[in-house]
Image (cartoon, helix red, strand yellow):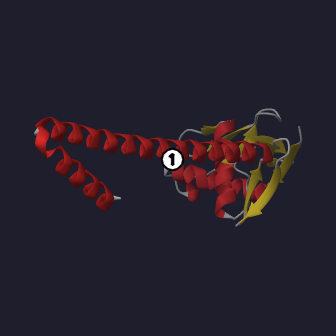
Amino acid sequence: MTMEVRYIVFTLEETRKAIVSFVRRQYRNGQEDLKGIEIVGHDGSPSVAVHLPGSPININTSDLVGLLLLYCREHHIPIPQRSQKNVQHSSGALTLVLTTDLVEGGAPVVVDGRVTYHDDTMSEELRAVRQELTRTIARAEEAERKVAEANARAATIEKVRAEAVSIPASGLRGWMLRLLVNSKQSA
C-alpha cells in the first residue's frame, strides 16, 4: 500500500505565534503576560510549557497538533483531511507530520485547494449497487402495475357476476349485448 508522509517544519517564530494564539483562545490571556515558552519532552511526543506570571500552562501533544492545524488554517496552508497528524520537536521548534495511506488504486486529486482521494474500486462497487437498485425498482414498479391490472380484472368479474345473478332468464340476450357494447367502449 502506498503511503505519503509530509513534514511541515515551523520556524521558532511561527511556533511561538501558534502557541500564543492558542493560549489567548483557551485561557484568555493577553500576549503581554507571556514570560516564555519552553518545548519539553522527547522528539516523538513533545509538550510545551508556557510560563505566565501566575502558574505555567502545560500543552500536551494532542493540543499541539490542534494549535498547529489552527495556525495552518489561518495561514492557508493546505492539510489533507484524511491524513494522520502528529507533532515532533525539531530545531528548537515544532514539525507537523502528516501521514496519508493511499487506498490501493486511489490517487490524490486537488479540487479547490483541497486534496481528496479517488478510489476506483469503491466507485465500481457503488456503480454496481446503483444499477442493481435501479433494476429492483423497475421490477417493483412492474409488479405494482400487474397487481393493479389484476385487481381491475377481478373487480370487473365481480361486477359481471353480480349483474348475472340479478338478470331474469328472458333478458339474457339484452344483457349480453349491453356487456359487449360497454366492454368495447371502455377498450
Side (left or right) of 129 relative to 180: right
Side (left or right) of 26 relative to 40: left
- For label 1, the residue is 27
Identity of the residue drawn at 58% across and 58% down: 31
Vertical comparison of 140 with 45: above or below: below
Side (left or right) of 138 relative to 62: left
Q: Nearer the viewer, residue 52 or 143?
A: 143
State how many labels appear: 1
Vertical comparison of 164 with 174: above or below: above
* Image location (x, y in percent) of residue 21: 60, 56
Q: Nearer the viewer, residue 184 or 119?
A: 184
Vertical comparison of 45 with 66: above or below: above
Identity of the residue drawn at 54% across and 47% down: 138
Helix, strand or loop under label 1? helix
Amino acid type, residue under disc 1 in the picture: Tyr
Identity of the residue drawn at 23% across and 53% down: 177
Q: Residue furthest right?
A: 2
Q: Nearer the viewer, residue 136 or 14?
A: 136
* Image location (x, y in percent) of residue 35: 63, 50
